[in-house]
Amino acid sequence: MLKLWLLYFIAFPFLYHETLYEVYGLRVALFYGLVAVHCLNLSFTGLSKIQKLKPDLLDMALGLWVSLRFVSYLALHTVLDNPPPGWLYGLDTLMLESAAYLFYLCLRLETPNSEFFKKLGFGMIISHLAVVCLQWGWSDFSWVRELSDGRYNGSYFHPNVFAILTVAIFALIWFDSARGCKKAQRTDYHWYALILTLIVLWLSASKNAILGMGVLLFFRSKFRWFILIAGALFFFLFLQLRSNVSPEETFRNKLSHSVSIRLTIFQSTLFAISQNPAGLGTGQYATRIHSYVKENLHSYFPHPKQHSLNKAHNFALEWICESGWLMIPVLLLITWILYYCPFNHCKAALSITALCSLGSVHLNYPEGFLLFSLLLAGMNRDFEEIS
Amino acid sequence: MKAVEIFFRLFFALIGLGLLPVSWFHYEHQWQLHKLLQELDQSLKIDTLLKRWSQLDSIPSPLARAHQDYYYFRFLVELDESEKAMKLGLMLQRSFPGYYDLEQWLSVLELQNRNFKGSLYWVEKAIDYHPLDESNYFQKSLILKRMGLDKEARKAQEEGLMIGKRNLTFRNH
């Protein structure tokens, strides 16, 4: 089954077709199918694995998170004001999240090793580069998505999602020697991954991902000052060159604007959280946030169909807003457990994904969320090492 | 031990068997919705809408339901199916106020029904939720003109033009 998942994730950017309504439609449909096959496989052959599994703190905390999502779905249809006109509303989000938890448990039973993640990292980075080449040379191809305002998106929902996933994959490769990464010797393979990631970052023009990568390398590298200076130079060069494309791009690439847009969205979300202790309901952020939107957010997103208006740009805030104040201790508990998990390549990739998600939308979209679940399953659970 | 084994086997088998059709329905739903939107964009006909919609509705997939219903509502308004559209529109607005341009379409619907006061009420609501969307002001101007309030209509139109000019300099993404 692990081979099947490996294939799925390597083919991830190519699982797109223009005849489906959502960009991630095919990826999600196949995901459900693979989880189904995995469950059937476990039912017939993997019983010994199930019996050997000893749930740990992280499994239970994640279980608590899924349960809370389920409770807030029930609350949406029973307790909250103005319930939606049917049980199908919000069920898509709940189903995906529950299936992702099941996927996580299935992978825990299979215990993927570092070789699996090494293959996954290298395979995904190559497929990301391949999809960039296709977007550049064969944009009419119906299995490849068109560019988003000149930015390469790797057939994902947004260029930021593409860039942040690439940085997460890079972290998997860069820190593949599990422990003692500061002293680890880098081979050609690591440097190729670094170059490929920088190319993707440049083409996707994602400031968030560049900052995330800088932070990751700065804190986990023996050449931290060199990385800091080189990273700063790359970032300023990036801002300078990318901003010469057009006046629109100039505006887009001004960091201050990006930050102020996000701060305005956070303000609106915090206001909604303060007004709704029980939350807005699972999967209802996009549909119910508009009553709490602050005046100045309209300056950035005047038209109601602009998608950015429908996302909190911070995974924790979005989940708290949907599931209520109870989500705060649950998220804190998960963070606390993850913090004490011994460092390995999955923890590096997971940290970078979570860090970038504090200012972006990718964990609230299926692609980012599924990769996040995969990384959670690969965490080092040797909790005895802590002591 | 035997009972635990049977429980686990049954549990995973049931989930697996349940998720297989979910996978297919999800794909089918995505494809049907895309086809529906494409066909209706090319030629908007009530027969096509109702036929495709019943096909779509028969697939038990919960694909972003509010989003899908919003499209259905919008097409019903465009096809002047007042009764159905009003029922669905009001239902959606009650649960999801300010979602997309729901209030503006409700205003269009009331205008089609020649209920000017109702139309003005909804467009004002639309302005409350999205004060910098210029199309709301043009809609308001149209309603005021139909009501014979030319001066106010011109004012609303100028406001819309001013806001539209401002929005052009902002990112459209």
Image (tube, coloured by chain):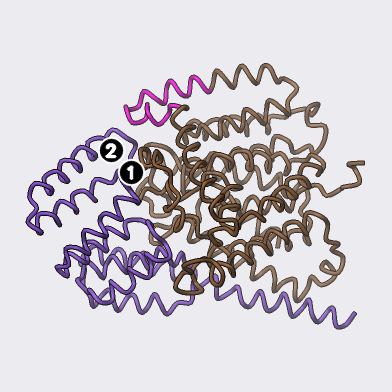
As drawn, A309 above or below B8: above
The reply to the same-chain question for discs 1 and 2 is: no
Q: Position of residue A4 (x, y in %)?
A: 65, 60
Colour purple, chain: B
- A232 relative to A181 in the view: left or right: left
Q: Is residue A247 visible?
A: yes
**Marking on residue B167:** 2
Chain appearing in brown on the rendered image: A
Q: Amino acid at mark 2?
A: Asn
Q: Which residue is mark 1?
A: A302
Are there few (<14), some (14-19), or many (20+) residues within 10 Å of tag 2? some
The x, y position of residue A69, in whole percent, is 63, 62
Which image quarter holds the N terminus of chain A?
bottom right
Disc 1 chain ID: A
- The residue closer to the viewer here, A355 or B80, is B80
Q: Amino acid at mark 1?
A: Pro
Q: In the rendered view, tell whether residue A359 sits above or below residue B118.
A: above
Which residues fall within the magenta stretch? Answer: A235-254
| Res A301 quadrant in image | top left
Instruction: Please identify the quadrant where the C terminus of chain A is shown.
Output: top right
Q: Secondary structure at mark 2?
A: helix
Residue at image coords 56%, 44%: A314
